[in-house]
Structure formats: structure tokens, C-alpha cells
DNA sequence: CATGGGATTGACT
DNA sequence: GTCAATCCCATGC
């Protein structure tokens, strides 16, 4: 098992981090998966929560890189992000889909009645499958047991597709969604643009 | 202080 | 395809 991705990996431009996180591993406890879809959010564009400045909700976005930002979407779904860039700059990568690699039986138990493809193909789905929740918000993702952790992928870098982010109305023109090409575990339809 | 809108999902027509 | 669930917070009066 490789070491957790270093804090320095995340202390860079959020778009670069989002692109390079495809193919990495996200794990919590006995469950893990290969990241196959991400999106970048930055305070300089209106779709990012950090665009409106520091609030009680968005505080973690402006904190240290490699910390978690977990928030409640539509009052129901808990969405998991990793904070990027220098402290004081609000930016994060949203993890939108993973391909289950470990603990799939526990994932099935957590999401009864779902097909395997529906376990982790969506930002609100993968948090349920892995057991990520608001309790993990603002925590450092440094490998501490009981917290989510990100590890480098193995082998060659995956081929990427990029396109507009999903489910937003502002700054919808930015091609900041990244998916692994030909991977069936992504959410929704694959984007049409190259990496 | 009242209102409206989400970085979504799943059930239903 | 359509739509409700449910809550934080930004916006406007």
C-alpha cells in the first residue's frame, strides 16, 4: 500500500490537481475505489462556494490543502471535496465517481437494492458507499485512521476526457470535469472533449 | 426577517 | 421525462 498523497500534491492549481486525481485511490476503512471522475472548483469562478467569500460553510475551502470539504447538497446529499492551493485561496476538487476496488460487499450493504454500477457513480452516492459524511468536514486527509485517504494510482496515467461540469448554472462553460476515458463507472454521460 | 436556489438522487408517470 | 425531499446560506426588503 502506497503512502497517502503528500500535502504538496494538493498545494497547486486546482485544475491540475483535479486532472491528476483521476486514477488515484480514495479509501476509508475497509472500502476503497479508483477515482474515475472529478471536477475543479475555484474561488475565481461563480460556481464555487468560495466565490462568495468565507462563511461558516465555506471556511474549510480557504484552509490548508489536502483537508476535506464535505457539505450538504439539496439538504440531503453529502458531497466530498479535497481542498487545494495555498492557504487563504478557496479551491477544491469534487470527487464525482469511483470504481469500487475494495470492500464492495460493505458498499452493497450500505446501499441496498442498488446495482453495482450505481454504488459510487455520483458524488452523493460514493460518500454513502464509503461512509464519508459531514463528520469528516475540515479534517486533514493525512492517513489518520477513520478518515478518508488518497493514494497515488498505479501504472500509466489514465486517458482523460474533459467537459463542462455537471449540475451547475454559473460558469458552466469551463471544461473542468475530468473523466477516465471508456470507464463505465463514471456518473452520467462521458464528456466529449479530450484531456 | 422572508424568500429562493442549489456541485443530487431516486421514485413515479 | 417529471418532480419532491430538505436545509444551509446569500440576497433583498
Image (spheres, coloured by chain):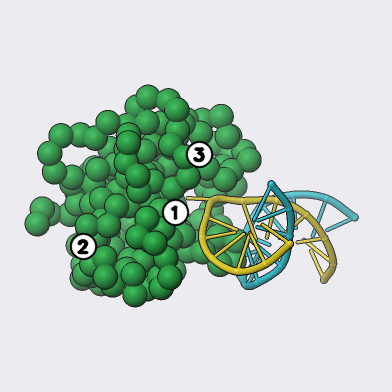
Chain colours: A green, B yellow, C cyan
Q: Is residue A48 above or below residue B12?
A: above
Which comes sooner in the sequence, label 3 or label 1? 1
- Cα separation, mark 2 vs mark 1, equals 18 Å
Residue at x 10%, y 53% (from the top left corner): A2
Q: Please check whether the numbered discs 2 and 3 fall on a single chain.
A: yes
Report the front residue among A52 and A148: A148
SS class, disc 1: loop
- Cα separation, mark 3 vs mark 1, equals 13 Å
Instruction: Name the spot of residue A55 as percent of width and height, x first.
Output: 56, 58
Q: Are marks 3 and 1 in contact (CB under 8 Å)?
A: no
Residue at x 28%, y 63% (from the top left corner): A148
Query: Dot 1, how many residues are within 10 Å of its Cα: few (below 14), some (14-19), or many (20+)?
Result: some
Residue A102: mark in rendering? 2
Residue hosting label 1: A122
Residue hosting label 3: A165
Q: Chain of mark 1?
A: A
Q: Is residue A27 visible?
A: yes
SS class, disc 2: strand
Q: Chain of mark 3?
A: A
Q: Is residue A18 visible?
A: no
Q: Chain of mark 2?
A: A
Report the front residue among A72 and C2: C2
Residue A138: mark in rendering? none
SS class, disc 3: loop
Amino acid at each position: 500500500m502506497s503512502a497517502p498523497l503528500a500535502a504538496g500534491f494538493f498545494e497547486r492549481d486546482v485544475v491540475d490537481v483535479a486532472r491528476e486525481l483521476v486514477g488515484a485511490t480514495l479509501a476509508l476503512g475497509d472500502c476503497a475505489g479508483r477515482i474515475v471522475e472529478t471536477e475543479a472548483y475555484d474561488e475565481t469562478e461563480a460556481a464555487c462556494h468560495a466565490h462568495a467569500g468565507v462563511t461558516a460553510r465555506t471556511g474549510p475551502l480557504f484552509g490548508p490543502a489536502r483537508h476535506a470539504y464535505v457539505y450538504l447538497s439539496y439538504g440531503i446529499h453529502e458531497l466530498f471535496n479535497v481542498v487545494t492551493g495555498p492557504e487563504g485561496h478557496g479551491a477544491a476538487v469534487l470527487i464525482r465517481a469511483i470504481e469500487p476496488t475494495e470492500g464492495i460487499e460493505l458498499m452493497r450493504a450500505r446501499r441496498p437494492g442498488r446495482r453495482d454500477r450505481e454504488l459510487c457513480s455520483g458524488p452523493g452516492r460514493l460518500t454513502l458507499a464509503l461512509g464519508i459524511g459531514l463528520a469528516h468536514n475540515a479534517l486533514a486527509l493525512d492517513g489518520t485512521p477513520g478518515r478518508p485517504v488518497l493514494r497515488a494510482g498505479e501504472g500509466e496515467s489514465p486517458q482523460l476526457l474533459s467537459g463542462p461540469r455537471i449540475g451547475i448554472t454559473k460558469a458552466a462553460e469551463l471544461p473542468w470535469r475530468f473523466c477516465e476515458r471508456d470507464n463505465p463507472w463514471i456518473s452520467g454521460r462521458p464528456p466529449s472533449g479530450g484531456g
